[in-house]
Amino acid sequence: MTTKAKKMDPEISRRKFVTAAMAGATGIGVVSFATIIGGLRPVGFITETQKPLEVGDVLVHAEGDKKGQPVGPDDLKANGPYITVYPKGKNGVRSEGQAGSFNAVILLKYALSEIVAPAKPEATADGIIALSKICTHLGCSVLAKGPDGNIPCPCHGSKFDGKSGKVLASPAPRELPQLPIKLENGQLVVAGKWLEPVYGAKV
Amino acid sequence: MNQWLDERLHISRLNDKFLRKAFPVHHSYFLGEITLFSLIILILTGILLAFSYEPSTRLVGDLPAAYASVLRIDTQPYGDMLRRIHHWTANIMVAASVLHMMRIYFSGSFKRPREINWWIGILLMVFTVLTAVTGYMLPYDNYSFTTLGVIYNITTSIPYIGNWAAQVAFSGPFPGEGVISRVYGFHIMLLPLILLGTTAAHMIIMIKQKHTQPMYAKKIAYKKIVGVPLITQQTPIMAILFLLLLGVICLFSAYIPVHPVEVFGKPDINNPVSNIKPDWYLLWVFGLLAMLPGSLEIALPFGGILNAEFIGALVFPTLVILLWFAVPLIDRAKENQYYGEAPTEHPKRLAAGVAFFTLMTVWSVAGYKADLLAAGVIPNEQTFLALFWSLTFVAPLVVYFLTIALVRGIKGLRDADKRETAAFKGEAQSADD
């Protein structure tokens, strides 16, 4: 009985008190510091140019002489080089995406019969297929078509087929996502959401 | 004047304790010094560059301010040279630290009582590489920009916290407005402070524990510290070494341009530079990324994904660093080590080290995947993967056993030679009798 009473003695030694106080202070310090680290992430606000594309956006030239002008079917040659385009919404060209530029789209033209799975021929317009420009491996923009007609990525050597978006050389994990498009009044228009999530988009 | 100072500050104690430290005389002991001198050159040139560099992505005309300020530095008198010296010295610092580490490893100098300094040395090397990589991003030209994007995306590949961590580290979704000031903070404040702190610890522990003695010291004076004192003999040697190093770096910088920002152009997310590679010391990670199939994705509980990018760019390098950390735990000495060991006396350690660097070389060559395929050296991707994956497993093993066989073979031949000589001498002697 006496020993139990001794154990329950409310008095604590000075050493114990100081140790507990220091541990407590360290804990509070660490937690406070963690909140500071967390605060390093800026509060995101999305500008008009960064918003994801919407159905009905008109595709416009991303670069060159016709920058900002809508793309017509005559701007592309079958089996020719691709052109880079941005979707243009009501409030301006969506030229910037977040975490990469997910809005950058490339347009390629082929004979309709050449467009094969995993691409969907019904999502193309007049033999024009729209693919994401962002490599699915680590988010680099792909380069212009190589001499073999395929689309290489500069970062880790992946290669894609323009006719389907299919991966021809790893390490890219999946095909370039396809964007459904349609022709409206001689302009190419976004007809639907991306068929696969674009690189970096939240799935 | 010395007396005046001594009466007030007791500098003679400093003299006894530090300034008379004995430095072993051997050329391989210069590697650590070269690393230290590189750090000094980097800090000095870095300060000069920081005077004119503007860490901002704000647009000046149609160029980001960071890129515009680097272009301006290049037009200033000696500006381009300063940037080249800074860049070259960074490469030399990493190279010297790798060679320094090889010397310590192959001579067994990491053994008791110097394990702590080996671990600190590894931290130093990791932070040196991180500082070099963050410095790579600062010019904010098209090349750096693409590299920065890849590093951002590698950070997002960490399971569970990837996106959050990447946004904390690089100020929001890439390319965030604050990304350059964030990386600038890492490169000129955080990482150099860590580097200086760890360097100081490395030096103080080295002075406290003293250098491992080179082999010849055993013959001169057994269990005594052999070497020249820091003041006055070692100091002029250091000064000459420093000037030589600076001279070599200036020569390199004058004739071999590095990272020509004018050629790469301003950051353009739609038109990346066509052939991107990291500097040589990270080429092995790059090669690994090119070798691992991107389709490799393992689902973790609670929605995490373990993908090829994470495994290649973060898990493997971490394993390699852990392996280095484990070295003094695997190869141990029972008593304190005074002398460096001859590598050939420890064939297994020698062979393991050579095998490790073989593996690094294989992975680094794999980093040239796109070039090898384009040049037709390797016909197609399947052959590339088959070749480099088999080399990954076979080459280190072959090199390991080859090294051991070579060392043992040469030793056997020498022993046989010795025996024969002794026998011959013995015969000659008996004939004389």
Image (cartoon, rainbow, N blue to C red):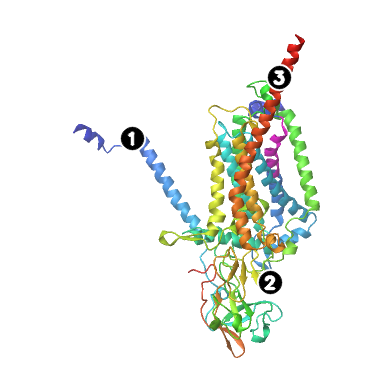
- What is the magenta range? B25-38
Q: What residue sits right under mark 3 in the picture?
A: B422
On screen, B251 above or below B275? above
Label 1 environment density (alpha carbons within 10 Å; few <14, some 14–19, many ≥20):
few
Q: For the residues carrying marks 3 and 1, which lies nearer the camera in this image?
A: 3
Q: CA distance from mark 2 to mark 3?
A: 71 Å
| Labels 2 and 1: the sequence-earlier one | 1
Question: Position of B371 compared to B319: left or right?
Answer: right
- Image quadrant for the N terminus of chain B? top right
Task: Check if residue B338 falls in the magenta segment.
Answer: no
The mark found on residue A148 in the picture is: 2
Q: For the residues carrying marks 2 and 3, which lies nearer the camera in this image?
A: 3
Dots 2, 3 in contact, CB < 8 A? no
Q: Are marks 3 and 1 on the same chain?
A: no
Label 3 environment density (alpha carbons within 10 Å; few <14, some 14–19, many ≥20):
few
Q: For the residues carrying marks 2 and 1, which lies nearer the camera in this image?
A: 2
Q: Are marks 2 and 1 on the same chain?
A: yes
Q: What x and y, as percent, mark residue B369?
A: 66, 59
Dots 2, 1 in contact, CB < 8 A? no
Q: What x and y, as percent, mark residue A50?
A: 56, 73
